[in-house]
Image: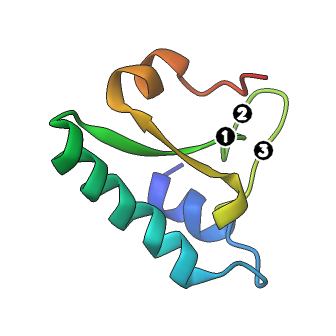
Amino acid sequence: MDRHILKTQAIPKWSNQKYIKLWYQLAIIEEERTGRKVHVDHIVPLKGKLVCGLHCEDNMQLLFAEDNISKGNKYVV
């Protein structure tokens, strides 16, 4: 399934779009500050093997790109 479609389907009505946008703005700020690529990561993957998360501000975190890529599509406790 296309990632954009997956995200769209995973957005709950109660999510705060301003805060979601802020996560992506913070990623840019951190990239400029550290000189390293930063990803907005879904803590609980949108489409995982055991669990599926939501595209909302409470399910996001910033990770350096290499850490996010090594995590893959897993929910790491």
Q: Is residue 66 left or right of residue 76?
A: left
Marks 3 & 1, CB-CB < 8 Å contact: yes
Marks 3 & 2, CB-CB < 8 Å contact: yes
Please name the residue that numbered disc 3 is placed on.
52
Judging from the image, what secondary structure is the residue with disc 1 in?
loop
Q: Which mark is residue 45?
A: 1
User: Residue 30: image x %, image y %?
Assistant: 30, 48
Q: Sort mark 3 into few (<14), some (14-19) or many (20+) by Cα contacts within 10 Å.
A: few
Q: Is residue 47 left or right of residue 21?
A: right
First-in-chain label (3 vs 1): 1
Quadrant in the rendering for residue 6 = bottom right
The amino acid sitting under disc 1 is Pro
User: Residue 31: image x %, image y %?
Assistant: 23, 45
User: Residue 41: image x %, image y %?
Assistant: 52, 43
> In 3D space, how far apart are the residues under numbered discs 1 and 2 (Cα atoms)?
5 Å
Q: Is residue 38 left or right of residue 19?
A: left
Query: Can see residue 56?
Result: no
The amino acid sitting under disc 2 is Gly
Residue lying at 47% horizontally and 62% vertically, measured from the top left: 23
> In 3D space, how far apart are the residues under numbered discs 3 and 2 (Cα atoms)?
5 Å
Marks 1 & 2, CB-CB < 8 Å contact: yes
> In 3D space, how far apart are the residues under numbered discs 3 and 1 (Cα atoms)?
6 Å
The amino acid sitting under disc 3 is Cys
Judging from the image, what secondary structure is the residue with disc 3 in?
loop
User: Residue 69: image x %, image y %?
Assistant: 42, 23
Q: Nearer the viewer, mark 1 or mark 2?
A: 1
Residue at the top extreme of this rendering? 70
Residue lying at 44% horizontally and 21% vertically, measured from the top left: 67
Q: Which mark is residue 48?
A: 2
- Above-or-below relation of 16 to 61: below
Residue lying at 57% horizontally and 82% vertically, measured from the top left: 17
